[in-house]
Image (cartoon, grey):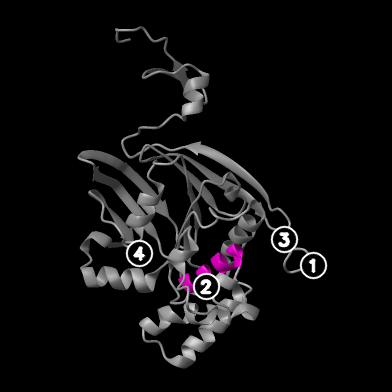
Amino acid sequence: MSGGATIVCEGLVKIYRIAGRQVVALQGLELEVAAGEMLAVVGPSGAGKSTLLNVIGGLDAPSAGRVLVDGVNLNDFSDSCLDRYRRERVGFVWQLPGRNLIPYLTAWENVALPMVLAQHPERIRRERVTELLAAVGLSERAGHIPARLSGGEQQRLALAVALANRPSLLLADEPTGELDSATARDIYRLIRSLNQTYGMTVVIVSHDPGIAHVVDRVITIRDGKISTESRVTDYALEITEQASSIAEPQVTVEELTVLDSAGRLQLPKELREDYGIGDRVRLERVPDGILVRPVQQTRGKNE
């Protein structure tokens, strides 16, 4: 079992320049992920989810702030160190199978390729490929090229490829976006099983609200910051007598609003709309906490 990586994001800012204008994808985002944790990142399109994944994976550099992986600042890495980090310590799974797999190689050869590039001995490669194909349920499909595999099988193979070099961190960007809901559930459960077997830290970007059933924690990003966090407080995954049949897990989820290091919080859009909250609120002390009340907005005046 490989150990999982710890991740700390401090004040992450990412600004892109597109068509002559600045687009702020991350706005001082702060996040901690424990070693071996399975975390889902959700939120609307354009919120900064994929940008966060790219920065953690060393594919993009932040405009400000830093990412610490096992206490080491990625900003301090040279280009060659970043290449080694991406190749050996991080496994990537993307939404489109064509980005994960070499189309003219068999399943066996696709899984072996990262280890060939890392110059692992042939015996080690053979053992690892056999182990991983079995772990993702593709032992009988080892000689097939990706075009002869279903969409779900291709993503299973992509997971095996991502784990070839025993990474401590698995990053998955919409890994079920091209799959039907039943196959998507199977893929998420497989990722959970691999997380438990190999101990690596997992961060998944997803639009699927059902992902809360298989992860330890869900964070919602809005406007480049973490808005809410949902923690799984109770998790039970029941496996039936048939190994391929897994019942819907029973979970208890608690959603929390996240404050940044300056004490700021984001109120979800639906709550602001439901209670008519504009750009100001009243805070009142009550015996068991703080009460947030909407303020009647007056056009042209400040409250």
**Of callouts 2 and 1, the N-terminal one:** 2
Which mark's residue is nearer the viewer, 3 or 2? 2
Q: Which residue is mark 2?
A: 160
For this rendering, which residue is in front, 244 or 252? 244
In front of the other: label 2 or label 4?
A: 2
Graded by Cα atoms within 10 Å as few (under 14), some (14 to 19) or many (20 or more), the crowding at tag 3 reads some
Image quadrant where residue 73 sits: bottom left
Q: Which residue does the numbered mark 1 point to in the structure image?
A: 241
Q: CA distance from mark 3 to mark 1?
A: 9 Å
Identity of the residue furthest to the right in this view: 241
CA distance separating discs 1 and 4 = 39 Å
Residue indicated by mark 4: 70
Which residue, given by chain and number where applicable, does mark 3 sit on? Answer: 246
Q: Nearer the viewer, residue 259 or 302?
A: 302
Residue 14 position, x and y percent, is 27, 46
User: Which circle's residue, 1 or 4, is located before the other in the chain?
Assistant: 4
- Label 1 CA crowd tier, 10 Å (few <14, some 14–19, many 20+): few
**Numbered range of the magenta stretch:** 150-162
Where is residue 96 shown, x and y percent of the image? Answer: 48, 59
Whichever of labels 3 and 2 marks the residue nearer the N terminus, that label is 2
